[in-house]
Image (cartoon, rainbow, N blue to C red):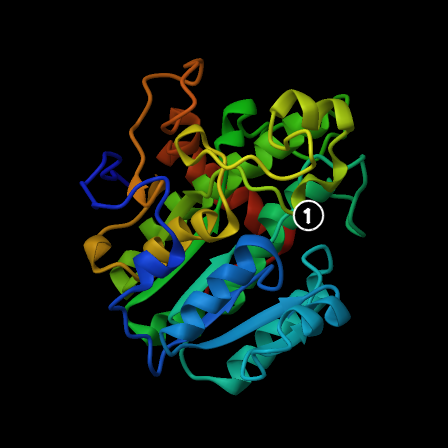
Amino acid sequence: MLTQQSPIGSGFGAASTVEEVIRGIDLTGKCAVVTGGYSGIGLETVKAFRSAGAEVFVPARDLAKAKAALAGMPDVVLEPMDLLDPASVDRFAQHVLKATDTVDIVVNNAGVMAPPFSRDTRGYESQFSANHLGHFQLTCRLWPALVRSRHARVVAVSSYGHRRAGIDFHDPNFEHREYDPWIAYGQSKTANALFAVALDSIGKRSGVRAFSVHPGGIVTDLIRHMSKEEIDASNIIDKDGAPIIEPENNKKTPQQGAATSVWCATSPQLDGMGGVYCADCEIARALPSDESTEMHGVRPRATDPVAAGRLWQLSEQLTSVRID
């Protein structure tokens, strides 16, 4: 499971937008699935794929909100799905598999950040469940169509929040430790990155490659659980209530935030590669330790192939879902 976790000189950067990275890419005849594709960077990702000719499927927990956001894109296929509800994940995947023979791109973009403590119906902590386990199940269910593509890519939207925590394999669902919303978020974002490492190792022989992404700091609905004190300390909104945009300091527009996902999903620069963590439309630099104080780059906890394998096995156990 060795990966090329070092920059390749893509020519893009922190300020690059989806329009720039999708330019010249033809997705005619391709099929893409984008979770969270009706708000924030997910919506920009859908717009980019659609502009390049792809057929796009978007699962939605809030269908009314999704229909309003995608009203100008009637060709986008909307179906209900709640990442916390395994039965609804299966129903959505079945709809996609009935509608198309192949899936060429999956962007696991939806997520939640630092909410109050809650569990899904199985008793699993909500961030680990929604951000990781739901996407694990969805990708596994879509596996036959991904393999039929022969050149599929799966993108897991992680975060530099992985620096906050690794996977607690003894207590991933906070049954025996006190819940900390930011530790739980960090665990789920590390899980997103490790998922890509493991999936790429499994899928590359079948032409399925996987990448994880840090999109940057973008003011979207994701911050809804942050307190005013946390928002003020993050310095992401100015005195007039407008988002602060400083791409070089990790503060981006949604168009800039979606660019790395779109680059990973479509760029020929990444042909033959996979299992890497990317940021700013580039493969991120590997940091020397999990204790590194640097804000850029990826910590070893998010690229460790042994931890990735353990997480894959744990995910199979918790979901009772496996790749056939």
> At 56% from the left edge and 25% from the top edge, which residue is drawn?
165
Foreground of the two, 247 or 226:
247
Quadrant of the image occupied by residue 37: bottom right
Quadrant of the image occupied by residue 202: bottom left
Quadrant of the image occupied by residue 307: top left
Residue 55, x across and y down, in percent: 45, 79
Residue 71 seen: yes
The residue carrying pointer 1 sits among few (fewer than 14), some (14 to 19) or many (20 or more) residues within 10 Å by Cα, namely: few
Specify the amino acid type for callout 1: Asp
Residue 157, x across and y down, in percent: 49, 47
> At 53% from the left edge and 37% from the top edge, which residue is drawn?
217
Foreground of the two, 322 or 141:
141
Look at the picture and state if 273 lies above or below 235: below
Look at the picture and state if 202 lies above or below 188: below
> At 69% from the left edge and 61% from the top edge, which residue is drawn?
86
Query: Element type at marker 1?
Result: helix
Name the residue that disc number 1 marks: 221
The residue furthest front is 240
Residue 102, x across and y down, in percent: 40, 78
